[in-house]
Structures are given as structure tokens and as C-alpha cells.
């Protein structure tokens, strides 16, 4: 049994078939957590799709209307890079509902994980890079509107810069945006986050951890937020097809643990989301995401690091 809840829905799967985005990963992570005895049935919660009024706290009415009436332009479809259908739309609304629920459970339990979400390339008025709806921004705006939190921090360790997050919260002093990413990679240009660390191609575990540690120290000097949303992409992995950093699976788990330890030391709850992961072998992507849950469990239970399991 885990010391926190995991948010999952079978319809998270975008059912993209042969696509660089392994949309079956959501189910595979869920199944691995269950079959390996890491999580029990009672550890999982199923989200509802986010209500439209919550989605509209972030996205423009005209964009949402286009999604709901299937009337994106050809260039908007190409930018999104995944098909718009009833099924994919439902999956993104569920992902946003999942991040909202993860935020609420994190406030109660200190940690919660959404086994989807982290769609950090979505902008208020358009989607791009496999991201239709910015689930984390919806969750933050929703929790703020409900008076559950005043401030939040996004800690984004996906290999790609969190451009949508930076654009949405750029002028907002209640949300601190942190992104550590590969500088020479999509997206171009990169709107400024509150703390941006653009890494060189091939950066390995040791240099990465040093940069992350320094960046987190700078971030927490500027804000102690009410809640952290962790966007823990699996794509800084050295075998990733869309990433160019050199992290090992063990290094990625150390990364997760470092973020969670910083939060725990300061008593800040964390809601984690998955974001990207395009390893040559989908099993590696699944392992990296499962390890995020193990790292969180170790930190919440204050267990010493046991390395790569
Ligand atoms: Zn990514």
C-alpha cells in the first residue's frame, strides 16, 4: 500500500497506434504498479473529466469551441501532432480532471500522482506538441479559484522546455514556473519561465543533478509555494528518441528524489504528472515513470535511497 493516492483512468490512453507518443504507457505504468505489488487497488482513484468551466479558466472559448466542434484549421491540427477525435478529446479532459484531483489529494496527503498529464506545451488559444489541454494550469487555476491554494510552483524536468506553462503564468506572480530542459531542442522559441535552465546536448547524470540542485535552491529562495506541480518527463533519458540529454534510468530516479526531498524539507505538498517519454523501448519509459512513484514513496516514508530498483 502506498502512502498517497494515484490518479488513473483506463481512458487516459489516446490509442494512437503506431505513433512516437506511446499512448499505451498510461495503462502499462498502472499495470506495472499493480503487478509488481507497488500499489493496491485501493491506492488508485479514478478522475472525472474536468468541467468545461474549469478548462475555460486557462483556455480561450474560441479554442475550446474549435476542439468541441472539430473545427481546428489544418495548421492547428499539424501543430497539435495528434489526431483530434472524441476519444483524444475525452482523454485530455480526463487528464485535466486527474491533475485537479491530484492537486486536491496532494493537499490532503502531502503527495499525489496523476498517471497522465504534464501537457506543458498547450497554450490558452492553441495546442501543440501532443498537448491539447494544459492540465496542470487548469488544476492550479481551479485550486486557486476554490480558495485551496494561493500560490503554486511548477517544477518541469521534461527534456523539452515548458513553453505553454511559461506563456500562461508569465505575468502571474502567484505561480512560479521552473523548467530544466535541453536548450537545443523543441520548442523554439522558448518564452521565459521564472527559472529556466537550458542544458547542453548530452548532459549526464552528475552535471544534471548539480544544475537541478542549484536551480531548486534559487527557486525556493524566491517562493515557498502552497503546492508544487511536478512535470516529470521521462525524456531526459539517454535512449529517448525526441531528447538529446544523457541521463540514465538511475539518474532520472535521483532527479525525482531530489525534487521531492526539497519539497518535503519545506513541508510543501507535491502533485506529480507524467509529461513526455519516447524511449526506443517503451518498457524503459514505463520503468522511469514507475520509479517516480517509488522515489515519492521513499521520500514520503523517509526511507533512504536504494538506487535503481
Ligand atoms: Zn518532452
Image (tube, rainbow, N blue to C red):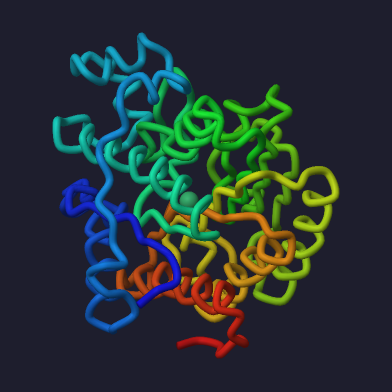
Quadrant occupied by the N terminus: bottom left
Instruction: Please tell me how many numbered marks the rendered image carries.
Output: 0
270 lies left or right of 76: right
Vertical comparison of 75 with 19: above or below: above
Vertical comparison of 111 with 135: above or below: below
> Viewer-proximal residue, 116 or 267?
267
Q: Position of residue 188 (x, y in %)?
A: 59, 35
Vertical comparison of 16 with 109: above or below: above
Q: Position of residue 186 (x, y in %)?
A: 53, 43
Q: Quadrant of residue 147?
A: top right
Q: Position of residue 115 (x, y in %)?
A: 35, 57
Q: Quadrant of residue 36?
A: bottom left
29 lies left or right of 107: left
Residue occupying the point 41% across, 67% down:
289
Residue occupying the point 42% across, 37% down:
135
Residue occupying the point 24% across, 40% down:
91
- Does residue 65 show up? yes
Quadrant occupied by the C terminus: bottom left
- Does residue 164 show up? no
Q: Quadrant of residue 52?
A: top left
| Residue projecting furthest to the top | 62
Amino acid at each position: 500500500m502506498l502512502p498517497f493516492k494515484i490518479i488513473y483512468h483506463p481512458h487516459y490512453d489516446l490509442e494512437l497506434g503506431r505513433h512516437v507518443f506511446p499512448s499505451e504507457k498510461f495503462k502499462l505504468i498502472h499495470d506495472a504498479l499493480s503487478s509488481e505489488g507497488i500499489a493496491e487497488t485501493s491506492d488508485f482513484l479514478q478522475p472525472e473529466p474536468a468541467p468545461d468551466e474549469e478548462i475555460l479558466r486557462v483556455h480561450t472559448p474560441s479554442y475550446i469551441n474549435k476542439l468541441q466542434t472539430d473545427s481546428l484549421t489544418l495548421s492547428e491540427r499539424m501543430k497539435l501532432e495528434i489526431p483530434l477525435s472524441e476519444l483524444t478529446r475525452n482523454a485530455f479532459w480526463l487528464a485535466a480532471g486527474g491533475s485537479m484531483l491530484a492537486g486536491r489529494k496532494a493537499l490532503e496527503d502531502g503527495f499525489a500522482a496523476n498517471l497522465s498529464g504534464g501537457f506543458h506545451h498547450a497554450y490558452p488559444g492553441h495546442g501543440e506538441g501532443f498537448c491539447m489541454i494544459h492540465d496542470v494550469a487548469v488544476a492550479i487555476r481551479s485550486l486557486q479559484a476554490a480558495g485551496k491554494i494561493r500560490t503554486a510552483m511548477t517544477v518541469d524536468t521534461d527534456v523539452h522546455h515548458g513553453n505553454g506553462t511559461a506563456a500562461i503564468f508569465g505575468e502571474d506572480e502567484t505561480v512560479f514556473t521552473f523548467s530544466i530542459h535541453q536548450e537545443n531542442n523543441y520548442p523554439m522559441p522558448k518564452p521565459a519561465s521564472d527559472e529556466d535552465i537550458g542544458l547542453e546536448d548530452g548532459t549526464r547524470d552528475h552535471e544534471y543533478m548539480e544544475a537541478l540542485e542549484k536551480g531548486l535552491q534559487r527557486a525556493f529562495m524566491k517562493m515557498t509555494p502552497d503546492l508544487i506541480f511536478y512535470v516529470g518527463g521521462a525524456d531526459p533519458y539517454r535512449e529517448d528518441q525526441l531528447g538529446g540529454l544523457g541521463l540514465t534510468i538511475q539518474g532520472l530516479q535521483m532527479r525525482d528524489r531530489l525534487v521531492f526531498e526539497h519539497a518535503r524539507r519545506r513541508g510543501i505538498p507535491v502533485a506529480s504528472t507524467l509529461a513526455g517519454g519516447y524511449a526506443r523501448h517503451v518498457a524503459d519509459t514505463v520503468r522511469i515513470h514507475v520509479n517516480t512513484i517509488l522515489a515519492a514513496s521513499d521520500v514520503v516514508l523517509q526511507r533512504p535511497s536504494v538506487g535503481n530498483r
